[in-house]
């Protein structure tokens, strides 16, 4: 009921923010894939709380336990179950929120839909749910790299109104990870950090934009008409907490161009592969990947839970005020970078298996 994603490479996440733990079951991963478990942990380390002065101070090691699906680090082709235990739980920080709905958070809508909710930390609405996605995405990344040499890399492009101009041809994981805000431009990153700290001191929050690049994507991923590649990417990325916008290729900016300016001219190719002079399509045409780099952007709203006092209502509908306690990110974007990469990798891995299943017999 909404906790599973994918067709052939399929994941199901479970757990609440302040429950015993969170995790994922990966079904459909091909057998005989040698997995680097340290690489899975490294992705979780990029996502975990308490990693810098601009993230939530909640302390969690987020050590992953692989419960099934592997033999000596090699996939069996059976379900891979992974779990991360919650250690630093403080449900007492959420007592006020048990009777007052946080504005723009999921409290009110969960209560209206289900008549009950895991109020401590937001339950399934918490970004802690994404642990399972990131762990599964780390497997998808390894599958893509082995099958096609595909690389998925994301970075923070904008925080509030501070934007970096990053050259996608040269951006590297090392450059992204060199700053705590995960913007590969050090000078702009410093300004972003200052802005997040200043807004955080006021008890407020801010949002921004993450950009993602897929290098060497396989050709032919995506299926007409409802399973177009960009449609599945949009669903995957818009399922992440706090997302409010999605663009691929030229995005909304492309609406300012004429067709003669926007069209990507095809170029002769000696190896028979599709090549284009420009890439306004963002590597996807007709819902199918053409082999050019896939480039997309995701907008994240300001964190809903803030310390500033706000007008709201309680469970009975009466007016009240709320100044949230607890440990919350003043800006979700630095920790959301590996989440974006994971969801993109999951979509590509699923479509790669679907493409192979339909089109590789002859």
Image (spheres, rainbow, N blue to C red):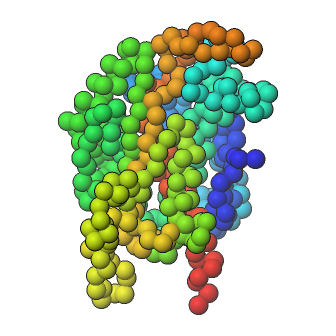
74 sits left or right of 276 in the view: right
Q: What residue do we see at 34% from left, 50% from top?
A: 173
Q: Is residue 306 above or below residue 83?
A: above
Left or right side of 234 for 81: right
* Count of marks overlaid on the render: 0
Of the pair 198 and 316, the residue shown nearer to us: 316
Q: Residue furthest left?
A: 187
Residue 291: % across, % down: 40, 73
At 47% from the left edge and 45% from the top edge, which residue is drawn? 245
* Residue 59 placement (x, y as % from top left): 52, 24
Q: Is residue 156 or residue 34 the one in the foreground?
A: 156
x and y, in percent, of residue 281 in the image: 38, 66
Q: Position of residue 17 (x, y in %)?
A: 64, 30
Q: Quadrant of residue 181?
A: top left
Viewer-side residue, 259 vs 281 = 259
The answer to whether residue 234 shows anywhere in this view is yes
Is the C terminus in the top left, top right, bottom left or bottom right quadrant? bottom right
Task: Report whether 103 appears left or right of 191.
Answer: right
Residue at the spot 66% in from the left edge and 65% down from the top edge: 8
């Amino acid at each position: 009921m909404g906790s599973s994603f994918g067709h052939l490479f399929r994941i199901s996440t479970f757990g609440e923010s302040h429950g015993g733990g969170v995790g994922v079951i990966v079904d459909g991963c091909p057998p005989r894939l040698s997995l680097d478990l340290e690489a899975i942990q490294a992705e979780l380390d990029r996502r975990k709380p308490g990693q810098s002065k601009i993230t939530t101070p909640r302390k969690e090691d987020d050590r992953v336990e692989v419960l099934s699906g592997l033999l000596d680090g090699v996939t069996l082709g059976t379900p891979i179950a992974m779990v991360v235990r919650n250690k630093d739980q403080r449900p007492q920080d959420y007592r006020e929120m048990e009777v007052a709905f946080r504005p723009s958070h999921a409290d009110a809508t969960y209560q209206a839909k289900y008549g009950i909710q895991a109020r401590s930390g937001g339950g399934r609405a918490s970004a802690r749910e994404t642990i399972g996605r990131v762990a599964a995405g780390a497997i998808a990344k390894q599958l893509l790299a082995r099958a096609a040499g595909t690389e998925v890399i994301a970075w923070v492009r904008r925080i509030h109104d501070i934007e970096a101009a990053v050259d996608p041809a040269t951006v590297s994981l090392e450059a992204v990870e060199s700053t705590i805000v995960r913007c590969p431009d050090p000078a702009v990153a410093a300004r972003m950090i200052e802005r997040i700290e200043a807004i955080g001191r006021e008890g407020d929050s801010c949002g921004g934009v993450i950009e993602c690049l897929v290098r060497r994507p396989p050709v032919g991923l995506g299926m007409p008409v409802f399973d177009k590649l960009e449609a599945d990417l949009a669903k995957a990325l818009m399922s992440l907490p706090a997302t409010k916008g999605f663009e691929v290729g030229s995005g909304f900016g492309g609406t300012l161009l004429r067709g003669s300016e926007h069209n990507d001219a095809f170029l002769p190719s000696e190896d028979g592969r599709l090549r284009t002079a420009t890439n306004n399509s963002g590597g996807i045409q007709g819902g199918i990947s053409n082999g050019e780099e896939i480039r997309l952007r995701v907008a994240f709203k300001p964190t809903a839970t803030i310390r500033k006092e706000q007008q709201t209502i309680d469970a009975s509908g009466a007016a009240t005020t709320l100044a949230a306690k607890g440990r919350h990110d003043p800006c979700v974007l630095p920790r959301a970078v590996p989440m974006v990469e994971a969801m993109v990798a999951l979509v590509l891995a699923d479509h790669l298996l679907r493409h192979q299943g339909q089109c590789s017999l002859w």
